[in-house]
Image (spheres, grey):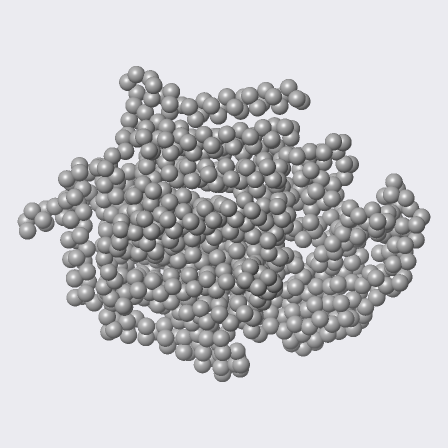
Amino acid sequence: MASLGSACLLLALVVCIYGIGASLYGVRRERPEWSDSGRRAIYALAGVLTVAFAVLEVAFLRNDFSFNTVADTSSMTTPTFYKAAAVWSSQEGSLLLWAWLLSMWSSLVLFLTRKRMRDVAAYATAILLGFGGFFVSLMIFYANPFATTHPAPVEGAGLDPLLRFPTMMIHPPMLYSGYTLCTIPLAFGMGALLARRVDAEWIRAIRRFAFAAWFFLGIGILLGARWSYAELGWGGYWGWDAVENASLMPWLTGTAFLHSLMIQEKRGMLKVWNASLVLATGTLAIMGTFLVRSGVLNSIHAFGGQTLGVPFVCLIGVLIAGSIYLVVTRRDMLRSEHRIDSLLSRESVFLANNVVLVALCFVIFWGTYFPLISEALTGKAASVGPPWFDRYTVPLALILVLLSGIGPVVAWRRGTLVNARRNFLAPVAIALGTLVVLLAAGVSGKPFALAMFGCAAFVLGCVGQEFYRGVRARRAMAGESAPVALMALVRRNRRRYGGYIVHIGIAVLFVGVAASSSFQHAVEPTLSVGQSSRVGAYTVRYVRPTATVTPSNDAAHTGATLSLGAVLDVSKHGRHVATLNPSEGYYASDEPSQGSVGSLIGGQPVSHVAMNAGITRDVWSAIAPDIETLQLKRIVEIGNRTIPFVRPEDALIAVAFLARSYLQHPPPAQFHFIVSPLVMWIWIGGLIVFGGGLIAIWPAPSAMRRRVAVLARDRRARAAQGLARA
Amino acid sequence: MGILVAILTVVLLGVVILLVSAPLRAARRPGVGGAGGVQINESTADRVDLQAAREAKYREIRDAELDYRTGKLSQEDYALVDGTLRAEAVEILDRLAVLGDEAPEDP
């Protein structure tokens, strides 16, 4: 079936080339049937790539090791759950996933806009097919997922153990959905500039997709942070890693765009800014993919090889040059229709929020690409670490959270100092009250964390007041009960109140970040069985060692050949709190020089974290057992000498003997214990953010739309009557 | 297996050709306008832009009312803002009327 997959890729490339030509011919010569044919090429691309993706997925599930990709990233012992996800763990499979998701999302947006903005959509179709053609070309010429080897190996190398984590099933598709969705506003933005149609229509058409890009990218980032926290064994959720940063940058500019597009919709302002943000977001999304897939920067998340750098650099160069050219040559038609009426208006706050978000993006961009910049200038690759990022991003994050409280309380167009004083009184009182309570409770010594708690309380006060006043106004108008009024208020103003909920989520998320990073306790003791260690107010005792042998018995369900761990008793002030079972998995390697027994456990060991998570704090633990003791090494050496490779069952018995020896004479193990306050609120905050996002993005029911249309006609009739009377 | 793959490839190619060529074939048929007979012209583009502007203006009027009712705008400021917005809405409606407005088209 590999040849069917390869045929699909060739067909996909032909479809892309045809579609680009048809779309451009159609729009330039005003031949809509050709534009339509180009649009249908996207649908065809989606269909062809769906078949290709299905072929690869089936090869993984059937252990067809004649596919090089399957042999490199899967094995007979890889759990089925992870075999399905292994498709996108490889360079080739992830490129196919990218192209497939791009074609699916592009088909959706072009189907929804098939009767609107035909000229803009035709250019957008050509650009989206250009992206599709680029990724399909990469697969055909650089990283073919359907390359085969004959005869097929009897066993594969297996999935990278770091990726054997449940969220890995959805983290890459979410992230890639976000990245691919970011290219849709870019394509329509470029299309609008090429067609010289830069009014509100293109913004309206892509608004929901810009929101979807923000939504999926955000979920992908959050799942990645969760994976880092629960799987990587270092206890953190954000390390300012190049790949993490690469996904955050388009999310930040996308967030800025979602705010500033409202100003263009309402006031016809910030057109240059919005066009630039859309183009920057799409380009940053491509750069994010480039970072993951080119291997140009070191990252724990970069699983690609180092072959794709040049094509990606060319694409990014074309995007940047094209974006600048379009914005500069269309600057006359991008002039603002109005000016900001008052500094105390929501437009001003949105503008400030945009400046902060873009500044954050710039800081992260500089820090992320600094190794490349320094290498280009000095010939030496130097990098900046988390303290450098923290120095600049923490103050900016504080301002951002503060603005997310100020924005909802300020009116569009104009506000007065009197109103501002009245509206900010309660939120400021709540913020100050929170600070007083925290200081009285002994929370001190971390000024930035305290400032963040104060800002978050201010946001909750502002947004809470908004909901309260909105409900009160609605009850006064419609005489509804408070819950009904609340539901009606949100339903009738989804974008506004969905956005407010997002602001609450952001404040909650930053409270979790500030508390967990500022008030964390961590120790890395070496303990023998029966010994204890203190971490914060908790005592952790190493009760006994644990061991499992054979992939099917692995307690973490990751297919480890050998898993060594510990039973830990966690107590506080003498009272039992939790029992934790951290372990470390040892996986088979494809390195014959390690011997018949050594190669069964010679792969990259992976820590399986155990934690007791709670609303107020997480107790987090990881273990690094010592299997380099003389006794255990001797078992491996004897096994290697006496058991040939053709008898893997006997080699497994040797591993079982090693496990028994470890249980009987457990050597001291290295542990890592962390007590972090309020980490749970990071995930809760994320859920609130995306819940609010869903409310904001959710389309109005068709019945409501009809009602709105009728109201609009009535209003128009009334306006016309009013005008006639005047 | 080889023959099956060849057949599947040919079928896929046929489906793709049928799909992308449908609008071109439809355009050649006598009496059928290409792409539903919709032509791209200045007035269509202007009308669509104005319809978008009209919807945005209606939303702005509703937002201003909500801002007033939630205490963010004083009575005087609201009267001023609302008056300006309604004047702008009427201006858009006038321009739409000149172009021959149609009911807003759902995506």
Residue A609 position, x and y percent, is: 68, 60
Decide if residue A725 is in sight here.
yes
- In the rendered image of this protein, does residue A555 appear above or below residue A412? above
Mark count: 0
Q: Quadrant of residue A425?
A: bottom left
- How far from the left and from the top, in percent, is residue A121? 36, 38
In this view of the protein, which residue sits in the foreground, A134 or A652? A134
Image spot of residue A411 (x, y percent): 27, 63
Residue at 49% x, 38% y is: A132
- Towards the viewer: A77 or A439: A77
Instruction: Identify the image quadrant of residue B103.
Output: top left
Question: In this view of the protein, can residue A266 be seen by the observer?
Answer: no
Q: Measured along the vertical axis of the image, is residue B16 above or below residue A112?
A: above
Q: In terms of depth relative to the viewer, which is nearer, A149 or A445? A: A149
Which image quadrant for residue A620?
bottom right
Query: Is A373 left or right of A558, judged from the image as shown?
Result: left
Residue extending furthest toward the top: B30
For image coordinates 15% across by 53% down, the residue present is B87
A186 lies above or below B76: above
Q: At x 58% / y 23%, what residue is drawn?
A: B8
Q: Residue furthest left?
A: A725
- Residue at the image position 55 percent from the left and 30 percent from the top: A10
Q: Quadrant of the N terminus of chain A?
A: top right
Q: Position of residue A471 (x, y in %)?
A: 31, 61
The one of A340 and A322 positioned closer to us in this rendering: A322
Query: Residue furthest toward the front?
Result: A378
